[in-house]
Image (cartoon, rainbow, N blue to C red):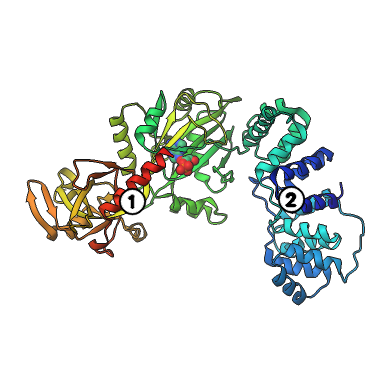
Amino acid sequence: MKYQKLADVYQNLENTPAKLEKVKIISRLMKEADDEELKMIALLIQGRVFPSFDDREIGIAAQSMEKIIVQATGFSSKDVGSMFRELGDYGLVAEKLIGKKKQQTLFNRPLTLEKVFDNLQKISGMEGRGSQDRKFRLVAELVSSAKPLEAKYIVRTTIGDLRIGVAEGIVRDAIADAFLDTETQEKKKESTSAVEWAWFLRPDYSEVALIAKRKGIDGLNNVKIQVGKPYHVLLAEKSPGLEEALSSFEKPALEYKYDGARVIIHKKGDKMWFYTRRLENVTRQFPELQDFVKEGVRARECIIEGEMIGFSKETGKPMPFQFLSQRIKRKYDIDRMAKEIPISVNVFDIVYLDGKDLFERPLSERWETLKTIIRPIKGKFQLAEHIETKDLEEADKFYRKALSASQEGLIVKNMDAKYHPGRRVAGGWLKVKPVMETLDLAIIGATWGTGKRAGWLGSYILGCRDEESGNFLNCGMIGTGIKEKKSEKVEEDSAGAVTFKELTDMLKSKITEEHGSEVKIKPDLVVEVAYEEIQKSPNYESGYALRFPRVLKIRPDKDVSEADTTGRIKELYSQQKGKRSG
Ligand code: AMP
């Protein structure tokens, strides 16, 4: 196929805003293509020459385009630069200048789809000294043998900015339209879901399009997951609260929602691959995970999922996701980073074991299977914290435990549910975590601690400001989010984390009354508080109580007159109700 044909289609798509029309345009092109062309079109139409999970990329930045267009057209940098400033798009600049080209091209054969595709793929493989120049030359060669419209899209594809408004959903629908039955609405839905299903398991439209063409809907529905290749994972839905989540399922399981990164572990004999939920290949970035899996997984071939969290080397405490994220994109210094940011993996699911897909099996069975193959390695590789209960009190306790272990909350899972790749499915996983609409509240009372916390003020009474009287009215008790020990690392405390001792020192002089272990404190110190929800409560002077509050940071920079008011809490309460009924 001539590249010109694709360029015309691009142009057509760019000028057609309607989604259905776009689907038809792409579908027509796909039907005309032979198998090899189809594979290329499925990618090129998205402006790619590799599927999204492939970490190879063309790697030419827009800024380099000026130089390339100069090489390709013979116009000066000044001309190219000023035209770019006028048009704001190197694609348009190339289109215009190729039309008026000063240099003659050596080969005047028309460009084929294959030539453009192969050359762009080749560019991504160029590495080492002088590779940048070789890349530029290859693109310049393509551009200079192109017609104006072709030049426009070659340039845009090279810099990864196609601007034709074709998202993944349009490619999916086009494949269904080209090769499957879409006569009735019902058939259309069935066909589209088959394409989508196949794409969840093989996230590469060039493969999916070919399966649709050759094997039709049955072929798509029978696509199997491949060990070593990423797939789109099951996602969680939001839940308004723990109680609702618990009552959503007949057989709920509760697990810590770890504040880390999802890791999908593929193992085939001694070979392993690790992917993130965004299908990034992080095998190289986590060398120690190879050792964990070798020691901790008893299976020849499997695909298991878990959440990895980063730990502080100094304190041994779990750190938030941002800390771990430094390792995910890392290309250099991998071993040093592995020492700086050690990880621990909590495994929670299995989707494939020794030749068998487990998607269709209920979670209860998958969890049992997982238990039989995991040999925990203390502090490094273990099953996720998991309980099965419908009892709210027990669930509450588990939730608090998760929060005080510095994790985000819970995921409540339906033990009867299948694993549905790629989706937030109703009836699958529900996440429960404190709502992050924070409140600034004053500390107005406390209780002296006992045992390990003797000598410190332990749990604190939070107060909001009553606009009319200016008094502070209690609205919750808090003990979570405060640390027992100071950490050695300055940056860990820089986020505002505070210890019981520090708080006690700050508040001691403000005690106005003592009754047994209970004290009243003059409102002076403001803390920023996160919580899960606000409830109406006659037991609190303000009429409201925060559920699962935790201290995010102390706000010595804030005066109590700036603390949030009863009115604000009332407002948040009604917004939250609005959200729930909506
Ligand atoms: P969210 O990112 O808020 O949509 O929550 C879903 C994410 O929570 C998943 O993609 C996982 O990375 C993470 N997660 C943490 N702990 C668990 C767990 N026990 N089960 C499932 N996902 C978990």
Is residue 346 visible to the viewer in this orientation of the structure? Answer: no
Seen as rendered, the residue at the extreme front is 468
Q: Secondary structure at mark 2?
A: loop
Q: Quadrant of the C terminus?
A: top left
Q: Nearer the viewer, residue 25 or 554?
A: 25
Q: Nearer the viewer, residue 52 or 355?
A: 52
Q: Secondary structure at mark 1?
A: loop
Q: Position of residue 306 (x, y in %)?
A: 48, 37
Residue occupied by mark 1? 315
Residue mark closest to the camera, 2 vs 1:
2
Q: Report whether 273 appears left or right of 131.
A: left
Q: CA distance from mark 2 to mark 1?
A: 58 Å
Q: Residues within 10 Å of mark 1 (few under 14, many from 20)?
A: some
Q: Position of residue 91 (x, y in %)?
A: 75, 62
Q: Nearer the viewer, residue 557 or 140?
A: 557
Amino acid, disc 1 = Thr
Is residue 520 visible to the viewer in this orientation of the structure? Answer: yes
Report the label total. Answer: 2
Q: Report whether 403 appears left or right of 95.
A: left
Seen as rendered, the residue at the extreme bottom is 78
Q: Report whether 406 appears left or right of 274.
A: left
Amino acid, disc 2 = Thr
Q: Position of residue 17 (x, y in %)?
A: 70, 50
The numbered disc on residue 16 is: 2
